[in-house]
Image (spheres, rainbow, N blue to C red):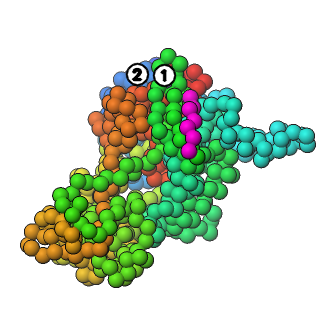
Amino acid sequence: MLDKTDDVAVSAENWLMQFEAALSDDDEAALKGLFLAESYWRDVLALSWNLQTLNGAEAILRELPVLARRVSPKNFAIDPARAAPRRVRRAGTSSIEAIFKFETAVGHGHGILRLIPDAADGNRPKAWTLLTALEELKGFEEEQGASRPRGQAYSRDFRGPNWLDLRRASAAYADREPVVLVVGGGQAGLAIAARLKQLKVDTLIVDREGRIGDNWRKRYHALTLHNQVQVNHLPYMPFPANWPVYIPKDKLANWFESYVDAMELNFWTGTEFVSGVYDEARGLWKVELRRDGTTRIMRPRHIVMATGVSGIPNVPDIPGLKNFAGQVVHSSRYGDGENWHGKRALVIGSGNSGHDIAQDLHSSGASVTLVQRSPTLITNIEPSAQLAYAAYNEGTLEDNDLIATSMPLKLARGSHQMITQQSRQLDEALLQALARVGFKLDYGEDETGWQFKYLSRGGGYYFNVGCSDLVVSGAIRLKQFADIDTFVTEGARLKSGETLAADLIVLATGYRPQEELVQRLFGEAVAQRVGPIWGFGEGQELRNMYMRTPQAGLYFIAGSLAQCRINSRYLALQIKALEEGLIQ
């Protein structure tokens, strides 16, 4: 059994030593003595080739030995290059936390172990949470640092093509097909393409916009990122140390251009993905692309949909809206408020986009009414909205990404419930003032806060950067959508008989589910096979995200810059393993 000791490093080392021995000896009794009855194991490809979480010692002990026999995990040890073992508080529970390294028959990995005393067994430290995550495949390690490529193809051959010639030829795909086609050139597409590039998997990004970064550049004029710079880096190239805390959209868009060039990513702008049909016999897609008025057929083996959580704009069928004589625009097509000075605007929808657009219009001199459709979570951008990222204010990005990966869903929900309670206390004065003017508030399912609203539905919250204060003061008027009877030529007619006159109506009504885009591009059969995308179903992982789906050769990646940075590694490793025949 584990030694009793207050030395955190010794406790972690003892546990890892006995864990490896129990796996090696196939000793299930010894293994059982290492886990709390209420414990959690999240495996990210390392043993299972899946992203999966098991809750409870019984479930862990049923599966862990079986998987371990297949890949022979060994050499578990505290990683001296990472943060030292320490006492921490996660999800309201104090524990010893240690980052360790290990290897399997096919790769090297890192993990996180959290130990807490087992009161039922003499307070011996046992595993509360365990993460095992694959980091690289043996024989296919990334070439960086001391092992960076030497560039022999152009460094010394004065008669051959130079670097630029080779880049242009690579991006043209005149005489070959990409192995992977990435649809969408935002943070998701760039992250997965960069990871695949490092794994030497030939990858092409296609995006319908005319310039790299336009998916951010063309959004509303005042937009900046709502979380802080230290959380938002892309893989391999962190933002410069002098960048602002909140990154403006155009600055980020320009960085995307620089990133594509620096990482040597193949990227076709102005390219529409029209359709894709999978050839089961050949294991290839037949893809139709439209570029510069011409059609190109490609046959990649893999398609990664990186079109984001926000895909097709949701334009609801609002009774009477067609009667309105002014301009109606979805928030995805809103630019700025300069042309609406002295005009009247209704903004329908009270999430981030709705509030930001309402504030932008107000700042431009428009008379604005915010129309709330459903209860909305409100949190001040500082400090409340940043509480979820507190860990990123210290330690290395690599350690913090691993910590974020390590939290099982149940504990993450509990952690965000505590954060939500804390933010409600911090924002109490604002929330009470909003309630007094009739704003309907909520705090997420089971009060899990904005993060789980995002993970379940992609919106439904606002980080207050001033618009809530304008609503409280009456500078921006507030109406409830339920109080609107219909729309008329002049604007919105309320059930009270009052007419809200308007020149502009902005529909900040969100986006359609991604499965609708799948149906449009790949057909009903593929959409049915894949099923729901994003959000949580019966399992404890985001549905069909960052993993193989029921449709061979089709994958999805979406989310914040941090989510894409973290999970692009694991999606790229799965595709590389498929290409090398390590998994089927």
Describe the element under mark 2 as helix, strand or loop: helix
Q: Is residue 229 left or right of residue 373?
A: right
Say which amino acid is labelled 2.
Answer: Glu
Q: Is residue 173 above or below residue 217?
A: above
Say which amino acid is labelled 1.
Answer: Asp
| Residue located at (55% from left, 37% from top) | 295
The percent coordinates of residue 536 (x first, y second) are 31, 41
Q: Is residue 494 left or right of residue 85?
A: left
In which quarter of the view is residue 469 placed? bottom left
Residue stretch rendered in magenta on the structure: 293-299
Q: Main secondary structure of the magenta part?
A: strand
In which quarter of the view is residue 343 placed? bottom left
The percent coordinates of residue 76 (x first, y second) are 56, 33
The percent coordinates of residue 105 (x first, y second) are 58, 23
Name the foreground residue: 47 vs 113.
47
The percent coordinates of residue 538 (x first, y second) are 28, 35
402 in the magenta segment: no
Q: Is residue 365 left or right of residue 146?
A: left
